[in-house]
Image (tube, helix red, strand yellow):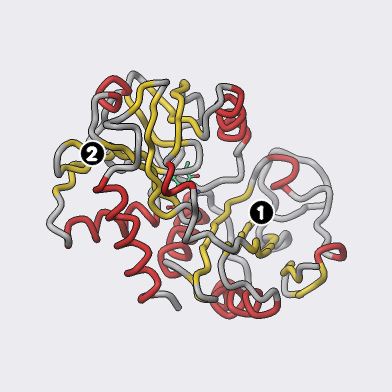
Amino acid sequence: MRTVYVNGDYLPETEAKVSIFDRSFLMADGVYEVTSVLDGKLIDFDGHVARLERSLNELDMEKPEAFDDLLDIHRKLVALNNIEEGMIYLQVSRGSAGDRDFVFPDPEVTKPTLVLFTQSKPGLADNPTARKGLKVISIEDIRWGRRDIKTVQLLYPSMGKMMAKKAGCDDAWLVEDGFVTEGTSNNAYIVKGNKIITRQLSNDILHGITRAAVLRFAQEAQMEVEERSFTIDEAKEADEAFITSASTFVMPVVEIDGAALGDGTPGSVSTRLREIYLDESRKAAI
Ligand code: PMP
């Protein structure tokens, strides 16, 4: 049984409790982060905490009391649950005011809820899917306008994954006004020649922590990076495509809406970037 963290306590998962009035439960009034663990160490930890702080600020949500102890809490959960490879999920909500009300509770009275738990995933880095690549479909992006904030409103991304599954595919890319925003739970890229193309940052997409690291590594490896929007038609004509996220790292995409990219196997740029990302991240892990 897992040991999880709730508001200062480390508890068996079956004993951890949050109020039914918690605003993340009633209003999706919560934000989250997912940090990967490789070799028992945290990947891109500082980036995830910085984005968490930004999400909280954007929503006028108080920092949990334990904010400055997050590294210790992550490490303790990794140790208590013997995580070699996997993820740490962290969620902060605006807490429970003991009733349902649209109006934010007084932050002096109602404190945020902080929950963390581990997910053990042996083989996360040596993932066979990375050798096969993903098939994606495109669907309309009907999410709200502040996708730069990592909220727990994941119903539409969840529906998108189900649409992909029904179509015999692995994931969906979201399209707004004719242009790809991102994947349901990842950032989206295409490759043309030696050029990596991914949508520019704005409120329309989540500012991926993996995205930032991968673009930095790509530039260091003399690959050309272009941050701009692209269409599904352009993507279908690309040499390669891939996604990035904390839990998939760099994952090749080999098919978009039924059209195979290149020879239908993971491309060399995507494969190389995955290797570089894994190598460099392991070195910098804490
Ligand atoms: N976009 C969306 C919509 C996501 O949910 C995620 C992962 N949670 C990402 C991009 C990738 O972000 P990161 O690299 O920080 O995991």
* Residue 94 numbered tag: 1
Return the x and y of residue 25 as percentages of the image width and height.
Answer: 74, 45
Q: Disc 2 or 1, which lies upstream in sequence? A: 1
Q: Is mark 1 within 8 Å of ligand 1?
A: no
Mark 2 secondary-structure assignment:
strand
Q: Is mark 2 within 8 Å of ligand 1?
A: no
Report the amino acid beneath label 2.
Val
Residue at the image position 31 percent from the left and 59 percent from the top: 213
Which quarter of the picture shows residue 34?
A: bottom right
Instruction: Name the residue furthest right.
Output: 15
Kindly report the distance in space between the C-alpha atoms of the residues bearing marks 2 and 1: 40 Å
Residue at the image position 45 percent from the left and 68 percent from the top: 43
| Total tally of numbered discs in the picture | 2
Q: Is residue 232 above or below residue 194?
A: above
Lateral position of residue 70 relative to residue 126, left or right: right
* Residue 191 numbered tag: 2
* Residue 167 numbered tag: none
Q: Is residue 234 above or below residue 248?
A: above
In this rendered view, identify the residue nearer to me: 152 or 261. 261
In this rendered view, identify the residue nearer to me: 276 or 72. 276
Q: Is residue 204 visible?
A: no
Which quarter of the picture shows residue 187?
A: top left
Return the x and y of residue 82 as percentages of the image width and height.
Answer: 66, 76
State if disc 1 and disc 2 touch (CB < 8 Å): no
Report the amino acid beneath label 1.
Arg
Residue at the image position 40 percent from the left and 39 percent from the top: 205
Q: Is residue 20 visible?
A: yes
Return the x and y of residue 66 as percentages of the image width and height.
Answer: 62, 74
Residue at the image position 72 percent from the left and 59 percent from the top: 110
Lateral position of residue 120 relative to residue 137, left or right: right
